Amino acid sequence: MKLIIVRHGDPDYENDTLTERGWKEANALVSRFLHMDVKDFYVSPLGRAKDTASCTLNALNRTATTLDWLKEFPAQVDISADPSFLEAYPDTRKEEDGSFSSHIVWDCMPSTWTKQQDFFNKDHWLDTNIISHSDTKEIYQTVIQEFDKLLSSHGYERHDNYYKAVRPNRDTIVLFCHFGLECVLLSHLMNVSPFVLWHSTAFAPTSVTTINTEEREKGIAYFRASSLGDISHLYAAGLEPSFACRFCETYDNWDERH
């Protein structure tokens, strides 16, 4: 089976849609699927993902199944629970009552999480202090359980750290979703901590990640990525990739996101 994960186009987060640039990216993306035999399309319920998918779906006269768990990974950390968290999340907003706003759990400073080896461990990252003061564990378990249900419905059942090829096939399924959520899905398939992918990859808007099953032993499948974050369709359309999801390349460049 081939699993394709597509990040939404350049986002207008305030209105949960795409920017003018994002719509151009989404239209350029259509070329990736014009001659591809896709069995099923799935999409996040959020507007920016649905809008991205709409260009491809309309061109192919197809529909997609909306899956609530494909929305951007929403886990938040309670900054007020531990003053040391302000070092990890220095851009946290202080409320009028003196408390601090919650913060996206994975968007922390690299100097914080890299000090703790547990963040690199696929089995122990959920037991770290930051994670224990967030809703991450429950949300993460829900996402990977629903992801495995989806894969099972397509013939691949999770067993320990690999999948049983109950109904091995060459079907292609496509997911339109979000960067943070994509890293969670990939970390589950690769058996690594999502923190490694959250901080070591930067999948540009409308990037395409392709993962194939390999059944080297009969009845046993493992997922292997053949491409991560491919944006060749943007270059083919004469479009430069947008900067969304990346941070400043050098600290003194204040024209880029810090």
Image (tube, rainbow, N blue to C red):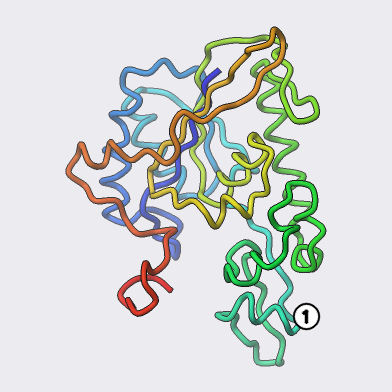
* Residue 176 point in image, percent of width and height: 48, 38
Query: Residue sitting at 37 percent across and 67 percent down?
Result: 249
Query: Residue sitting at 68 percent across and 49 percent down?
Result: 193
Q: Is residue 149 left or right of residue 200?
A: right
Other residues around mark 1 within 10 Å, as few (<14) / some (14–19) / many (≥20): few
Query: Residue sitting at 44 percent across and 48 percent down?
Result: 203
The N terminus: image quadrant:
top right
Type of the residue with mark 1: Asp
Residue holding disc 1: 82
* Residue 208 point in image, percent of width and height: 41, 36
**69 or 227: nearer the eye?**
227
* Residue 79 point in image, percent of width and height: 71, 77
Q: Is residue 10 left or right of residue 187?
A: left
* Residue 201 point in image, percent of width and height: 49, 51
Query: Residue sitting at 35 percent across and 80 percent down?
Result: 252
Q: Is residue 229 left or right of residue 145?
A: left
**58 or 226: nearer the eye?**
226
Say which element carries label 1. Answer: loop
